[in-house]
Image (cartoon, helix red, strand yellow):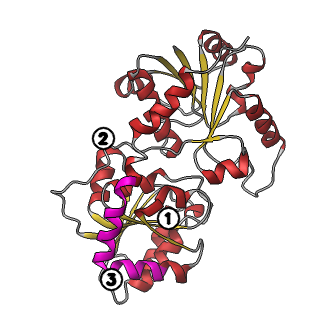
Amino acid sequence: MNILFTSHRFFPDLGGIETHSRILGNFFLEAGHNVVLLTKSLGHVSSDKENFDFSIVRCPDIRTLINHYRQADVVFQNNIEAHTLWPSFFIKKPVVITIQTWVRSTSGKEKFRDYFKKMMLRRADCVVAISESVRKATFPKALVIPNSYDDSVFKINHGLPRSRELVFVGRLVSDKGVDLLVNVFSSIACNIRAKLTIVGVGPEESALRALVVSLGIQDRVDFAGPLTGAKLAEMLGRHEIAVIPSIWEEPFGIVALEAAACGCVVVGSDGGGLPEAIGPCGLLFKRGDPVDLEKVLRRLLGDSSLRDSIRASSIRHLEMHRMDFLSKKYLNLLENLPKRK
């Protein structure tokens, strides 16, 4: 089967959609199917050939897009995007769309493009939402298949000392709430000997570094830069608690699964689909509430038996989010779609 796979963002960009696209692309290929991935992310042909076994077409023009539609047996969109979906009006191919995020503007209001996307969802042969929250808010008829994590990389390394306390992993943007975490950590650090590691890059990095200095905690906070794969797994494996303090309502949160798989207890805000990703792998706090976040962190930092109990409760949840388990659900959808006439 020829699978035309579209992913608006892909490596070298970093994020949940990029990770999910890589996992599914590799799985479809290993199952014996031909995969061509279209993306708007820039990259290099030599790097793509070195790192991926399936074909990657970056920034396709109209002619290239149409040619790939004609050659495809099925079109799979990992998050709805109009600029690679419009040929389906003229070239009748089965279409599966995964909704990876909210179909609305950052203000919460729907614009014309959002109405157009919802119209396209109604035309699709199958629609998948990555969480119950996304399904209810976007397309109630969608099938829910949560995102998976790479369990071949993210797992407990028993030979690694868990010698650090708190870690954040993500883009350094205001929506992620890293400044909230830094301020709360400053209060905690006054009477608890602990360190915070910040993994990631983004436009807020300079402001966050300045905030750390202004609070006088520069000896307690490490900026580790961007980490992926085995290096990220090693960093997570050295920490007790992973904090996801998002102000924005996350549609899901693969990083929660990656952290839990490496043995971290996860603390996350209570909005959107993030609680579904965390499940029994950690504790929630009221989104945007520094007092509640501090309360939860102090409780976990002071109770090793609670952390051990949460880790023990995480096993089943992680099993249900292994990449083979969930990728098979996607493959079954694609292999059993009726052909369009």
- Quickly name the residue at label 2: 152
Residue ranking furthest to the left: 159
Q: Does the magenta stretch include residue 155?
A: no
Residue nearest the observer in this picture, 9 or 46: 9
Query: Residue 244: percent from the left, percent from the top?
Result: 48, 64
Residue nearest the observer in this picture, 121 or 164: 121
- Is tag 3's residue or tag 2's residue first in the polypeptide sequence? 2
Whether pointer 3 and pointer 1 mark residues with C-beta atoms closer than 8 Å, the reply is: no
Q: Is mark 2 on a helix, strand or loop?
A: loop
- Residue at 54%, 19% in the rendered image: 3
Segment tinted magenta in the rendering: 294-316
Residue ranking furthest to the right: 112
- Quickly name the residue at label 3: 302
Q: Is the magenta stretch mostly helix, strand or loop?
A: helix
Residue type highlighted by circle 1? Ser
Residue type highlighted by circle 3? Gly
Quarter of the image with the C terminus in it: top right
Query: Residue 44: percent from the left, percent from the top?
Result: 45, 27
Residue nearest the observer in this picture, 204 or 76: 76
Q: In this view, does 300 lie to the left or right of 102?
A: left
- Quickly name the residue at label 1: 206
Q: Give the distance between the C-alpha atoms of the residues marked 2 and 1, in whole angstroms.
A: 34 Å
